[in-house]
Amino acid sequence: MMLPLLLTRKTNSGSCIARHSWLAALALLLAVPSTSLAQRDLKVIPDPDPELERQSFQLADGLEVNLYAADPMLAKPIHMNFDAQGRLWVATSEIYPHVKPGQQADDKILVLEDTDGDGRAEKTTVFADGLLIPTGVEPGDGGAYVANSTELLHLADTNGDGRADRRRVMLSGFGTEDTHHIIHTFRWGPDGMMYFNQSIYIHSHIETPYGVRRLNSGGIWQFRPETMELEVFARGLCNPWGHIFNRSGQSFATDGAGGEGINYVFPGVTMFTYAGATKILHGLNPGSPKHCGLEVVSGRHFPDDWQGNLITNDFRAHRVCRFVVTENGSGYTSREQPEIIKTTHAAFRPIDVKIGPDGALYIADWYNPIIQHGEVDFRDERRDHTHGRIWRVTVKDRPLVERPKLVEASVGELLEALHAPEDFTRLHAKLQLKARGAKQVVPQLAAWVDGLDDTDAQNEYARLEALWTYQSLDVVEPKLLEALLRSPDHEVRAAATRVLRAWRDDFPHAAGLLAAQVEDEHPRVRLEAVRALAELNTAQAAELAMRALDRPVDRFLDHALWLTARDLTDQWLPALQAGQLDCDGNARHLTYLLQAAGSPAVVEPLMQLLASGKLPRDRQQSVLVLVAALGDEDHLQTVFDMAMKVDSPPAVRAELLSALVQAARMRKVRPAGELGEIADLLDADDESLRLAAIDAAGLWKLTHARDRLIERATADATSDAERRAALASVAAMGGDSTSAVLTLCKSQHNAALRVAAIEA
């Protein structure tokens, strides 16, 4: 959300850099634009009057805004969620960014209530205090789940006075390396599980009844409180302070320190910055600013063309942003629309956003002219520790939604609420049904599903809500699941496939069901099936997943396939080595598995495929690059021989040579045979091929090429890039070659040559 404690880990604008390189950090610090350092010179602190702030807002057409709550009713809101009664629970921290030595931690969880329905909170209750920078709150299970530094707490009021008097540590061991990277963004999923995020500098090692669960970077956790099952749902993002589910249960996330806007999230996805990741899935808006918080528009208060739009906050630029997200193959595209709110007010810092029970949009305003905690002192007197607001945005001339009465509703009434167009109502109806328990709910739920009109297409989503209700109750319902796997709606089929992933152990024929899904006509169903197959832990599952390659594969599905191939390596690779796996004789399928594994053990099977002539031509180049990355000197010789084939395109030859150069740099290994032929490429017509040959000559210490390299470096017609590469190559040879470069540093040579020689 905010900025880091350690300047050596980020630039002042929050973008991530290599942790091990303080020199890189210094270079970036010196290079940042003066606008990102503006807070150091901030002289004019805005008047904290909420009305003056409201008057500064520029709103999108047709919208209006009012103040829902402000200081002294609350201060410094970090995160918020509504409960089924329509009360707004807010995690607040006046201590942030750190607790002073000897200071008593006294951050709070507040409950705000609009008792008369006029769109303004009249009542605030301190539900809990004495907390240290609570960064998440989600009401549920008779109280509220709270993020409290290293702990996930459940706080409950057992005597009805509105204050928590019972405290249970649900989980502990979450990292605290950075105060705005600790666990946050609590949200109930449509499946009845709770999801929450952590950020890049956090290393969490959590004891659970099912073993230790680890997340050593940013990502999203999935937690079932009643069974204490904790799993990693997604990995990556630098500072992910936003996560939502759309109507069909698909996830999206925002990154408060990234630059890719809206990110599409599915089980196991690996995104920007995840520690040790070798392949990542990029976001939907490359180059977009950092965003904090995320909500999906649903319900009758907003117009039809707003339905399914995503709302998030650019808190650095004082904006509330809107994105239209549309389907694109197995994933989505995202397009930014005019801002909901924008202002020049220096203290407006929107950091969370939720649709309320009345259909209005609620925005948590951290309210602070200072947000960084790297470029200004922790105790800078300009830091605001006392103010904070909740704004409420409504659509002019459109009626609000009548607040649903869910807490006292009967099971039948709650089931009917699953038809509601508002996500809020459907979610909280399911949570209320979950609270009633399976014994009371399941008989009526089964009858309700049986009574749905099969001819009404909208009832496909009602059935999906019923399936999620079963999942929330932890009750497996095979008949409904198998029916929805064959739904005419691809989004419902995809959602049902994800439920099958969760229920796989209760379906002996899960592999057969997923075999049909992986060949579904819609790519998102195939993506969900591919990720579900990863959970079966069999070699057969890997073979089945590769059948998705028989239809078009976009970047989202490719990422899912790659993840599943790697997840199942310990199953399919031994089977392959034992002669028990051949991917139905499909060389393309087998090649994909081998390339994804990233293990030296796959090099020999790849070499056999190359020798057999069965390797698809469009895979040969990438396979050879992989062999260069993983193979021994004999394998690298094969790659070298292919690079020297004059009938291959120059770009292919250059890539293969570059892969061999990388092997020399990273693994200190070179092809086994005679490499003198490389000198013939120093005069190649294609520059990329010449540059690759130049790099190889130096790393392989081919001293017989030294004079030709110096000749190219000193020629007036040689480009600067080639001159620098040639001299760097000569210097890499060592010995007398280094002396030859040193002589070119002398003043009698032209400046370009001297600079290149000094660099070398």
Image (cartoon, rainbow, N blue to C red):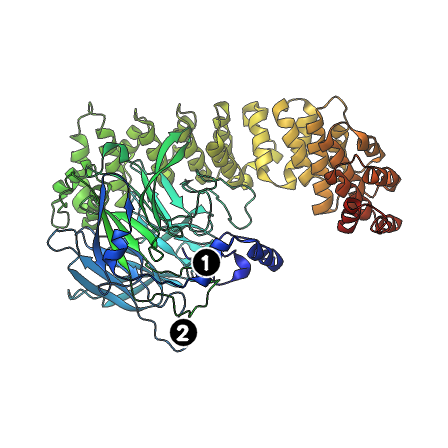
Residue found 25% across the figure and 52% down from its top:
55
C-alpha gap between disc 1 and disc 2: 26 Å
Q: Image quarter for residue 504?
A: top left
Q: Image quarter for residue 415?
A: top left
Element type where label 2 sits in the image: loop
How many residues crowd mark 2 within 10 Å: few (<14), some (14–19), many (20+)? few
Which of marks 2 and 1 precedes in the sequence? 1
Residue found 63% across the figure and 31% down from its top:
622
Left or right, residue 71 beside residue 100: left
Does the rendering let one see residue 506?
Answer: no
Farthest residue toward the front?
44
Q: Is residue 4 above or below residue 662?
A: below
- The percent coordinates of residue 78 (x first, y second) are 33, 58
Element type where label 1 sits in the image: helix
Residue found 50% across the figure and 26% down from its top:
549
Q: Circles 1 and 2: CB distance less than 8 Å?
A: no
The amino acid type, in three-letter code, at marker 2 is Lys
- Residue that mark 1 sits on: 38
Q: Image quarter for residue 467?
A: top left
Q: Which mark is residue 100?
A: 2
- The percent coordinates of residue 2 (x first, y second) are 42, 57
Does the rendering let one see residue 495?
Answer: yes
- Which quarter of the figure is the N terminus placed in? bottom left
The amino acid type, in three-letter code, at marker 1 is Ala
- The percent coordinates of residue 276 (x first, y second) are 56, 49
328 or 711: nearer the viewer: 711
